[in-house]
Image: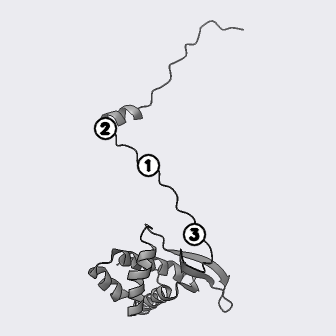
Amino acid sequence: MTKFRKLNRPTGHRMSMLRTMVSQLVKHERIETTVAKAKEVRRLADNMVQLGKEGSLSAARRAGAFVRGDAVIHKLFTELAHRYKDRAGGYTRMLRTRIRVGDAAPMAYIEFIDRENELRQSKPPTPQSPPRPALDPWTRSRLSRQFAPPKEEKSSESDI
């Protein structure tokens, strides 16, 4: 199991809270929570979208074991999988919003990108550079050698 932030909670409470938050994020597509919780939810929500994009029965069972509700699973495997089919990762965005009044905890919105009513528009994808052809080891070693510049001869006669 991967390492999570402890969030001052026992393991059962922490996992239950994160499962509920991921389910609510998928259902509403935007939730407000503390920054530390949003960072953990982001990791788990991106994994759930990856399972939705995979689309196999095994992936559906793994997602069903984590998220809560059949409507959430259906949304993962239909709407979100279709929306992010061309995206390689980074399905969520975290926007810091305010400081909570009661305990001064930093709050943040976490939302899915590329949806209606976004708080901030997503950046266009960066164009990928074309892959360079592979070089054989001999050519690569010849190209990587550093040759010293020719030495300049110092004349023994000093020009004054």
Q: Which residue corresponds to the image point at 44% horizontal and 49% vertical from the top-left?
A: 130
Q: Nearer the viewer, residue 158 or 130?
A: 130
| Closest to the observer, 16 or 66 | 66
Taking depth in this image into account, of 158 and 142 the one nearest to the observer is: 142
Q: CA distance from mark 2 to mark 1?
A: 21 Å
User: Can the viewer see residue 130?
Assistant: yes
Q: Which residue is mark 1?
A: 130
Q: Measured along the vertical axis of the image, is residue 153 above or below residue 36? A: above
Q: CA distance from mark 3 to mark 2?
A: 42 Å
With respect to residue 127, does 100 lie above or below? below
Q: On the image, numbered disc 2 is attached to which residue?
A: 137
The Cα–Cα distance between marks 3 and 1, rounded to whole angstroms, is 24 Å
Amino acid of disc 2:
Pro
Q: Which element carries disc 2, helix, strand or loop? A: helix
Q: Position of residue 142 (x, y in %)?
A: 37, 31
Q: Which residue appears at 45% of the width and 72% of the height? A: 84
Which quarter of the image is occupied by the C terminus? top right
Question: Amino acid under label 3?
Answer: Ser
Numbered disc 3: secondary structure:
loop
- Say whether marks 3 and 1 touch (CB < 8 Å): no
How far across and how far down the image is residue 81, in percent?
41, 77
Foreground mark, 3 or 2? 3
**Residue 30 location, quadrant:** bottom right
Pick whichever of labels 2 and 1 is earlier in the sequence: 1
Please state which amino acid type lies under the numbered disc 1. Pro
* Residue annotated with mark 3: 122
Mark 3 and mark 2 lie on one chain; the one further toward the N terminus is 3
Q: Quadrant of residue 4?
A: bottom left
